[in-house]
Amino acid sequence: MLKRITSVSYETRDLGGAIEWYTKVLGLKLRFRKGDWAEFETGGAALALHQTRGGSPPGGPSNATAIFEVDDVRSVRAILGERGVVCIGEIQDVGGAGWLTSFRDPEGNVFDLWQPRRSAKPRTRKARRASSRR
């Protein structure tokens, strides 16, 4: 039966440009590229990109979302925002699970950042300023 997810794949019109964005903006390490397929290291399941044939646009809207675990959702969201990443909405408290925020890649694919509840509560700007004065 099913064992584990080995990869999550998104379509892209421009594989070279997407590889550059995922490595430079997200900081992911390219595992390999072969033809119209590329995979990145994520510390678990691979994140894969697949070039659409003939430059056709990626498939229609998808409910698939890759979720990246982070230690501090606010700081990672701020870093990605500084790099021009389109963030979607605000950081959400998802109860006992932690905090979640979403963003899009240049093709419009949605990704989430998730900070588990076991991590410290996301710090507010006021709390960050107070700790930086110490």
Image: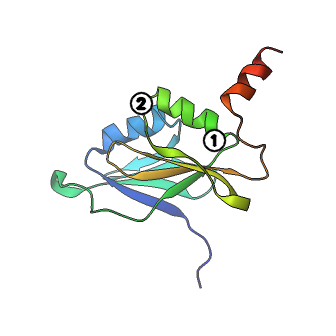
Q: Nearer the viewer, residue 39 or 61?
A: 61
Expressed as whole percent of the image width and height from the top left, the position of residue 13 reads 25, 48
> Image point 51% across, 56% down: which residue?
66
- Say which mark, if any, is on residue 87: none
- Tell me if residue 113 comes above or below residue 5 in the rendering: above
Q: Label 2 is placed on what type of residue?
A: Gly
Residue 63 in picture, x, y percent from top left = 41, 65
Local SS, label 1: helix
The circle drawn on residue 84 is 2
Q: Residue at x 53, y 35 (%)?
A: 27
| Left or right of 130 on screen, residue 82 | left
Displayed quadrant of residue 16: top left
Q: Residue furthest front?
A: 126
**How many residues crowd mark 1 within 10 Å: few (<14), some (14–19), many (20+)?**
many
Q: Quadrant of the N terminus?
A: bottom right
Distance between mark 1 and mark 2 Cα atoms: 17 Å
Task: Identify the secondary structure beneath mark 2.
Answer: loop
Q: Report the amino acid beneath label 1.
A: Val
Residue 106, image x and y in percent? Answer: 34, 42
Coordinates of residue 124 in the picture (x, y in percent) = 69, 33
Q: Which mark is residue 73?
A: 1
User: Label 2 neighbourhood size at 10 Å, few (<14), some (14-19), many (20+)?
Assistant: few
